[in-house]
Image (cartoon, rainbow, N blue to C red):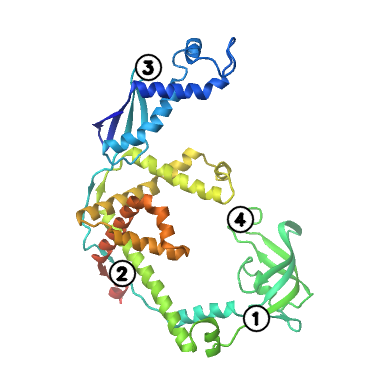
């Protein structure tokens, strides 16, 4: 096999790939052996007809198409690697010579990584991130833990009040007629959860067990069932059971039961620390995202159409896998969404462009600043994954040893992102600055 490279416009190249006549003949013979059992020729037992007889009967090119596909599939990956080019798209294949006894020659037009012209990437301005944790936020987190540890007490001697869990029978009527989907039996509902139509749960406060009552509501204008949107309705309701939550006291005993701390004060301090860490991580991510967006905006890169299309197809393929993992055929999803596969791929264009620019610009920053990932970075990343999946790091390494090069590139990009963020200049948020001026 031989490969030649021709530079084209707009970050495109044409590879001319030549497969030897001997290898092409082997491919033809391989196809012949696959297909001969499906061909019936008078005078020959099935599967025993000589290749030359079949070629004489059906034409010399009878096996060419499949042989060409086999040659392309087996030779293109090696040819792409041998070219030494950074190919970033699927190939557009054209056969230029196909004839028995001669080399098989085809071309592959592909996109290569386009040049990136960086603008300002050091000292970009980003919003200053204030990290403040209030007592209310700490109390909210602790109340969540109270909720988890609450016991339940069935109530028989009082009506429904806010916060109760109830079991409910109901049926809805619109213009005096029961409507589809408006009936429920033994339906569990927490009063105050706002999971029903606005006003529904409020009217159940004060209802007694076994008492039938009418609840009058109006469906929202944007209600999903168009035939009910904006219309008044009456629900005939009967509360069948009331349960209230009994929350544990917020004291040292509670702290000792739900945490590793023996006092409530220590537990609160730890909750505050956890919230602070979450906010710090969120602030770090926000700073990185804003800094990178600024750098991308000031950079110039012309994305080849083939590269963009390949990325669109990749994103669509990722989404298709997600749909299938949920037990749904992608074709059924497309019907439900009232779109076609091609339209869906086309809709991925903006996201594909965003991803490509993000990657290319950060790779260029890494190149400009000589940022590379080290073996220590790689090992640290594997350790993170091992901790996350609770697996032995050596087991994880076996899965990723062949993907090390790609992971090292990803880690270098992440280091470039960190570099851009670390070198950004934090300024007061514009909205806050304008408010202070107005005051």
Q: Earlier in the sequence, mark 1 or mark 3?
A: 3
Front residue of 109/394: it is 394
Between disc 3 and disc 2, the foreground one is: 3
Front residue of 300/288: it is 288
Q: Which residue is mark 1?
A: 151
- The CA span between labels 4 and 2 is 38 Å
Q: Residue 184 in the image: x percent, y percent? A: 73, 63
Between disc 1 and disc 2, the foreground one is: 1
Q: Quadrant of residue 347?
A: top left
- The CA span between labels 1 and 3 is 82 Å
Between disc 3 and disc 4, the foreground one is: 3
Question: At numbered mark 2, what does the secondary structure look like: helix, strand or loop?
Answer: loop
- Relative to 114, 55 lies left or right: right
Question: At numbered mark 3, what does the secondary structure look like: helix, strand or loop?
Answer: loop
- The numbered disc on residue 224 is 4
Residue drawn at the location 26% of the way across and 39% of the way down: 84
Residue drawn at the location 61% of the way across and 55% of the way down: 224
Q: Earlier in the sequence, mark 1 or mark 2?
A: 1
Q: How many neighbours does mark 3 have within 10 angstroms: few (below 14), some (14-19), or many (20 or more)?
A: some
Front residue of 21/304: it is 21
- The CA span between labels 4 and 1 is 36 Å
Q: Earlier in the sequence, mark 3 or mark 4?
A: 3
Between disc 4 and disc 1, the foreground one is: 1
Q: Earlier in the sequence, mark 3 or mark 2?
A: 3
Q: Residue 197 in the image: x percent, y percent? A: 63, 65
State whether residue 26 is above or below residue 417: above
- The CA span between labels 3 and 4 is 63 Å
- The CA span between labels 1 and 2 is 45 Å
Q: Residue 340 in the image: x percent, y percent? A: 51, 39
Q: Which residue is mark 2?
A: 429
- The answer to whether mark 3 and mark 4 are in CB contact below 8 A is no
Q: Which residue is mark 3?
A: 99
């Amino acid at each position: 096999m031989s490969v030649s490279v021709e530079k084209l416009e707009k970050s495109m190249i044409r590879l001319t790939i030549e497969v030897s006549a001997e290898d092409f003949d082997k491919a033809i013979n391989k196809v012949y052996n696959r297909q001969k059992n499906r061909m019936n020729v008078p005078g020959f037992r099935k599967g025993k007809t000589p290749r030359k007889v079949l070629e004489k009967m059906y034409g010399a090119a009878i096996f060419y198409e499949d042989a060409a596909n086999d040659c392309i599939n087996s030779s293109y990956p090696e040819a792409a690697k041998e070219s030494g080019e950074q190919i970033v798209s699927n190939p557009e294949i054209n056969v230029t010579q196909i004839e028995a006894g001669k080399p098989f020659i085809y071309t592959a037009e592909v996109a290569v990584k386009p040049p990136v012209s960086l603008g300002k990437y050091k000292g970009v301005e980003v919003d200053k991130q204030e990290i403040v944790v209030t007592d209310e936020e700490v109390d909210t987190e602790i109340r969540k833990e109270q909720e988890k540890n609450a016991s339940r007490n069935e109530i028989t001697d009082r009506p429904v009040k806010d916060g109760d869990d109830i079991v409910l029978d109901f049926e809805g009527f619109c213009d005096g007629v029961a409507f589809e989907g408006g009936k429920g039996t033994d339906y569990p509902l927490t009063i105050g959860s706002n999971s029903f139509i606005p006003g529904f749960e409020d009217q159940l406060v004060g209802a007694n067990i076994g008492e039938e009552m009418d609840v009058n509501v109006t469906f929202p204008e944007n209600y999903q069932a168009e035939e009910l949107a904006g219309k008044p309705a009456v629900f005939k309701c009967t509360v069948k059971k009331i349960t209230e939550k009994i929350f544990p006291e917020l004291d040292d005993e509670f702290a000792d039961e739900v945490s590793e701390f023996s006092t409530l004060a220590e537990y609160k301090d730890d909750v505050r620390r956890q919230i602070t860490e979450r906010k710090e991580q969120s602030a770090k991510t926000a700073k990185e995202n804003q800094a990178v967006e600024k750098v991308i905006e000031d950079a110039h890169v012309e994305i080849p159409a083939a590269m963009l299309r390949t990325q669109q197809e990749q994103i669509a393929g990722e989404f298709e896998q997600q749909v299938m993992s949920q037990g749904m055929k992608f074709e059924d999803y497309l019907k439900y969404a009232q779109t076609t596969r091609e339209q869906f791929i086309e809709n991925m264009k903006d996201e594909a462009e965003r991803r490509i620019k993000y990657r290319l610009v950060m790779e260029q920053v890494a190149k400009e600043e000589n940022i590379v990932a080290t073996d220590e970075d790689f090992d640290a990343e594997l350790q993170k994954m091992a901790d996350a999946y609770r697996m032995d790091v050596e087991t994880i390494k076996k899965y990723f040893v062949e993907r090390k090069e790609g992971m090292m590139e990803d880690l270098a990009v992440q280091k470039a992102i960190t570099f851009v963020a670390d070198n950004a200049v934090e300024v007061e948020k514009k909205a806050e600055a304008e408010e202070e001026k107005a005051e």
